[in-house]
Image (tube, rainbow, N blue to C red):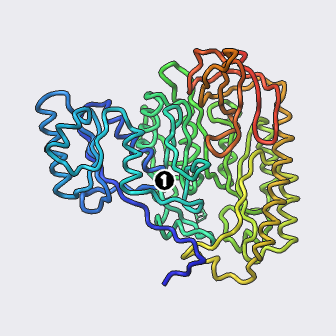
Amino acid sequence: MADKTLTRIPESPKVGMVSLGCPKALVDSERILTRLRADGYAMSADYAGADVVLVNTCGFLDSAKEESLAAIGEAMAENGRVIVTGCMGNEAEAIRARFPDVLAVTGAHQYEQVVDAVHVAAPPTRGPFVDLIPAGADGEVKLTPRHYSYLKISEGCNHSCAFCIIPDLRGKLSSRRIDAVLREAEKLVAAGTKELLVISQDTSAYGVDTKHEAQMWKGREVRAHMTDLARELGQLRTPEGHAPWVRMHYVYPYPHVDAIIPLMAEGLLTPYLDIPFQHAAPNVLRAMKRPANEAKVLERIKAWREICPDLAIRSSFVVGFPGETEEDFQYLLDWLDEAQLDRVGGFRFEPVEGAQANDLPNPVPEEVKEDRYRRLMEKTEAISAARLQRKVGRVIPVIIDEVGEPDEDGDIGATGRSQADAPEIDGQVLLRDVSPELRAGDIVSVLVEEADAHDLFGVVVES
Ligand code: SF4
């Protein structure tokens, strides 16, 4: 029987997809799959292996409707757990009359509702140990608004960090073809995405498994490699001719990461790096079996900031890993004083069923973990507050996430993010007196008037 003190993480659910119809429907299918892939769902190539099957239908002509109904019928017969979407979804009654047991029917371009229906039919594997996408404050999976999209470039991981079970759950690193990733990114941007969030378990290792296999893209050869990917994503343009923001997550500080910093300085990539350091003390990193664990990281961070002074670095740290001594913890605090990271998330070590770390000696008592967690948060908040204070008085680009309703004086507020803020995990920029014309996804210039430990406050100076 499983040990009740261990956190148990179930396997990822599998989704099958049948996509019929026009190129617009195909974009919807891609958006749905993009999001589901990012949520940790695996794709099933056949009906039998799928926990749920999505049928994206076409209802343009009678013959297309017949084809759609036939596809739903086949999916019902072969699997039985079916969600219908697409143009024919607008005729929900006709579908339900013929197939009363379909799980959900949603209309064309309602990709948020489809993803929601999948979450209900086959709940995603959640938890801080496997999530690539942050959950909302209430722990719910949030759907991304249309102006930003997660772009998953690979699945699995070749490392064997002692606290992690991803390689067991998701297997070894399996990178997507670079042309498939770029095509998906291009479609997302054409469909209204203003910000791409590149995710994987180990973004710097992209393509290692395929020996960085090259493909033709726009008449040139591009390799499945993080630097090629970054350069090509930096060439994308929105329908209005603007460069989308491109944010890199889960980047381990392998030497080739140095090559993407100049791309940030040139404006091709958002000057933001999410590097899950997890610790700084050599003993603890060794015990954790962390990749790219090398002594010169502080020097490299300094060099990166010389090349790109606006670079924001986010990271996460685990306190209370078995064997972590007070000296190790103090080493981490001193290291943070030097590294001056912009954003930090903290976790208290927790054993996860199947992880090697569970067998390590010298567990850290819970009250010590709590105390270290509090001290870590105090330290990183003070650093964040000082770094945000330096932005007061500057004009910075801000992407709008939400525009409020007018208050009793008719003033409208809005919430956005600077280039240093990824959605859900970092801070916000709170704007006063915005134009009623402002929309989610707009990128505006903002004069920063104030800052606290997490957020900035300001006013739009140019749309
Ligand atoms: S790098 Fe380590 S922590 Fe990250 S997925 Fe791989 S094994 Fe897990």
Q: Based on the displayed image, in which of its 4 quarters is residue 291 positioned?
A: bottom right
Q: Quadrant of ligand 1?
A: bottom right
Q: Based on the displayed image, in which of its 4 quarters is residue 346 positioned?
A: bottom right
Label 1 CB-ligand 1 distance < 8 A: no
Q: Is residue 3 above or below residue 206?
A: below
Kindly identify the residue that appears in the image at 82 percent across and 38 percent down.
452
Classify mark 1: helix, strand or loop. Answer: strand
Task: Say few, some or many: other residues with alpha carbon within 10 Å of mark 1 (under 14 / 14 to 19 / 20 or more).
Answer: many
Q: Which residue is mark 1?
A: 154
Q: Residue 93: image x %, image y %?
A: 20, 37
Q: Residue 46: image x %, image y %?
A: 25, 57
Q: Residue 318: image x %, image y %?
A: 72, 64
Q: Residue 28: image x %, image y %?
A: 36, 36
Q: Is residue 22 left or right of residue 329?
A: left
Q: How many marks?
A: 1
Q: Based on the displayed image, in which of its 4 quarters is residue 121 positioned?
A: bottom left
Q: Is residue 223 left or right of residue 66?
A: right
Kindly identify the residue that appears in the image at 31 percent across and 38 percent down.
106
Front position in the image: 89 or 295: 89
Q: Is residue 146 above or below residue 39?
A: above
